[in-house]
Image: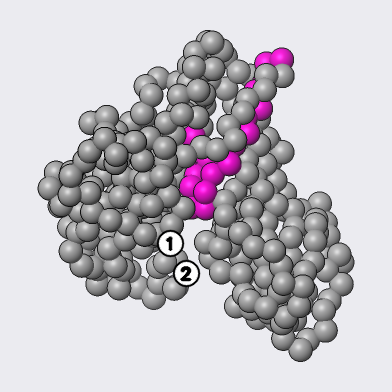
């Protein structure tokens, strides 16, 4: 049985930029130590409980491999190990894991230390560390062999610090050669057989992210990705709370300029669109290009949710070191550093 051709979608590299052509170019991710990320927890460990919070630094290792190593060392199933988010393999990542030991004796964690894993702290905690339980991530990124107009680069950095960047999902969400999107298409076409739950989850997440990116790309082309429109669903900064902007006045524009509220885009699922007017028309127009995806996400139990169209870049700094540049910034949980880099550096 043949599978229908997949819909045409925009690759991450083809998404429109908010500020036009990048002022400089260079090499990123030349080595793991060029891309350093540190998770920021929103709480302090309890100091007691059946769970162990492990703060570790991993180099050149993926998150799931580390989780399996921790489970094996502690003598618990992999399901007893959790983490707040996935981190790039080709990076130096300070990351948090939790292990549910219950009444088991605590192993000597340092016995696991290798060139790929280093323990930074071990703490008892009452609760499991759940996905997304982060305040954000802190990045330090080296751009090697910097070429271009450094004066324009400083102007671009100032613009990004003031206005933010489009909050695109990064290429890693879609898998190597966009395999997660191709998998999603096969799944929604009813052609996937015995798909592991984890893989199915990746495909659903990728298709949802792609629809969001397509809506955001449309708003970027219209130059209103960071501007409230009548009918927009406005997110309260730092929360999941949102409200419908029936009208747009100077007060709402001012709150948006201050990053107090954010225009949002759809994370597709069952239920009515949460927007109205022109924003709803734009979102409906995009979803109609992916009919099997929209129906499949609803059938899979996803609900209509919202994600900010704009990404605030905090603590943005740059330092020039001969032909290299060191970038530093903080992003909220769920945001991608590549969304920032693509507005600054051609790679």
In percent of the image, x 54 and y 44: which residue is there? 331
Q: Secondary structure at mark 1?
A: helix
Q: Is residue 42 above or below residue 30?
A: below
Q: Which residue is mark 2?
A: 198
Q: Which residues, given as a range, are shown in magenta?
A: 322-340
Residue closest to the far bottom: 103
Q: Is residue 289 visible?
A: no
Q: Position of residue 257 (x, y in %)?
A: 38, 35
Rounded to the nearest angstrom, the CA distance separating label 1 from label 2 is 6 Å
On whether residue 330 falls in the magenta region, the answer is: yes
Quarter assignment of residue 296 = bottom left
Residue 285 as seen in the image, left or right of residue 152: left
Residue 321 part of the magenta-drawn span: no
Q: Which residue is mark 1?
A: 202
Residue 17 vertical position relative to residue 60 in the rendered view, above or below: above
Decide which of 282, 184 is in the foreground and name it.
Answer: 282
């Amino acid at each position: 049985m043949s599978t229908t051709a997949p819909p045409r979608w925009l690759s991450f590299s083809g998404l429109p930029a908010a500020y036009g052509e990048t002022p400089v170019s260079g090499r990123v991710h030349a080595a793991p130590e060029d891309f350093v990320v540190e998770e920021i927890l929103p709480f302090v460990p309890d100091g007691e409980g059946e769970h162990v919070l492990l703060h570790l630094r991993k180099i050149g290792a993926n998150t799931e491999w580390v989780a399996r190593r921790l489970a094996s060392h502690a003598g618990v199933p992999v399901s007893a190990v959790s983490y707040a988010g996935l981190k790039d393999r080709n990076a130096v990542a300070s990351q948090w894991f939790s292990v549910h030991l219950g009444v088991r004796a605590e192993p000597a964690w340092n016995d696991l230390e290798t060139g790929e894993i280093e323990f930074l702290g071990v703490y008892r905690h009452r609760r499991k560390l759940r996905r997304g339980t982060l305040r954000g991530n802190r990045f330090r990124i080296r751009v090697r062999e910097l070429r271009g107009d450094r004066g324009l680069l400083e102007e671009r950095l100032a613009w990004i610090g003031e206005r933010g960047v489009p909050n695109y999902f990064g290429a890693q969400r879609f898998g190597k050669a966009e395999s997660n999107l191709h998998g999603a298409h096969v799944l929604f076409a009813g052609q996937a057989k015995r798909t592991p739950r984890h893989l199915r989850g990746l495909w659903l997440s990728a298709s949802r992210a792609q629809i969001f990116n397509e809506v955001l790309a449309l708003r970027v082309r219209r130059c209103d990705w960071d501007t409230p429109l009548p009918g927009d669903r406005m997110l309260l900064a730092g929360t999941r709370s949102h409200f419908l902007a029936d009208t747009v006045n100077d007060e709402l524009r001012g709150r948006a300029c201050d990053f107090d509220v954010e225009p949002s885009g759809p994370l597709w699922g069952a239920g009515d669109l949460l927007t109205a007017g022109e924003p709803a028309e734009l979102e409906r127009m995009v979803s109609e290009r992916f009919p099997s995806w929209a129906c499949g996400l609803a059938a899979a139990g996803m609900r209509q949710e919202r994600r900010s169209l704009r990404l605030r870049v905090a603590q943005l700094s740059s330092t020039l070191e001969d032909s290299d540049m060191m970038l530093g910034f903080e992003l909220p949980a769920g945001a991608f550093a590549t969304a920032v880099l693509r507005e600054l550096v051609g790679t």
